[in-house]
């Protein structure tokens, strides 16, 4: 049987990214993403719902997300859904789904505004050099 695990999300960070390192010194960043859905109901009223998604990225991607993004900034992520399980301090089993980021694109300008129709890429803050931020690891500067 064929299977596919692909997630595409565009939203705003719900909190500042939290960077940490694995024992192997691989960078890991965790952040929340709020994705809004807007529609008009049968009664003609505008409606909106927000889905909050936990995300995790590794390596160079993690470092760049941590370096350039803060709460409220827009981000497009491509990744896969993962299922985490753990035992809480009170001994109960806990679990949740999370998106493991495989690729991403900064959205909006340096001021943090929403991206235009084409989804502009974020420039490094003034005074910082533009290192290769190729989100897929492809050494492609933007």
Image: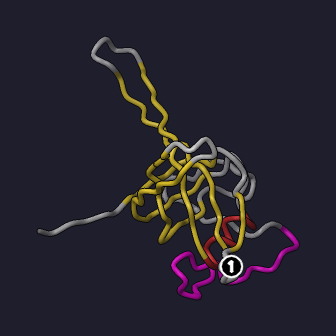
Q: Residue furthest right?
A: 127
**Residue corresponding to mark 1:** 23
In-front residue for pair 123/94: 94
Which image quadrant: the C terminus? bottom right
Q: Position of residue 61 (x, y in %)?
A: 61, 74
Q: Residue at x 84, y 68 (%)?
A: 126
Query: x and y percent of residue 115 in the render?
Result: 58, 53
Task: Answer above or below: position of 138 versus 65.
Answer: below
Secondary structure found at label 1: loop
Q: Is residue 130 left or right of residue 93?
A: right
Which region shows up in magenta?
126-142
Residue ID at (60%, 66%):
121
Image spot of residue 117 (x, y percent):
49, 53
For the N terminus, give its image quadrant.
bottom left
Tell me if residue 139 comes above or below residue 42 in the rendering: below
User: In this picture, is 53 found above or below 8?
Assistant: above
Residue 138 sits inside the magenta stretch: yes
Query: Looking at the picture, how far across and down is residue 35, in whole percent?
Result: 49, 43
Q: Residue lying furthest top in this view?
A: 43
**Predominant SS along the magenta part:** loop
Q: Is residue 39 left or right of residue 1?
A: right
């Amino acid at each position: 049987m064929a299977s596919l695990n692909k997630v595409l999300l565009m939203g705003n960070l719900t909190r500042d990214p939290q960077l940490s390192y694995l024992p192997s010194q691989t960078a890991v960043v965790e952040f929340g993403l709020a994705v809004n859905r807007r529609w008009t109901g049968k009664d003609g009223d505008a409606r909106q719902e927000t889905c909050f998604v936990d995300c995790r990225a590794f390596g160079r991607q993690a470092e760049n997300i941590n370096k350039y993004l803060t709460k409220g900034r827009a981000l497009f992520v491509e990744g896969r859904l993962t299922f985490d399980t753990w035992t809480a301090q009170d001994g109960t089993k806990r679990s949740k789904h999370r998106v493991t980021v495989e690729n991403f694109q900064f959205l909006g300008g340096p001021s943090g505004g929403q991206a235009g129709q084409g989804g502009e890429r974020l420039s490094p803050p003034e005074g910082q050099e533009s290192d290769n931020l190729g989100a897929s690891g492809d050494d492609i500067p933007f």
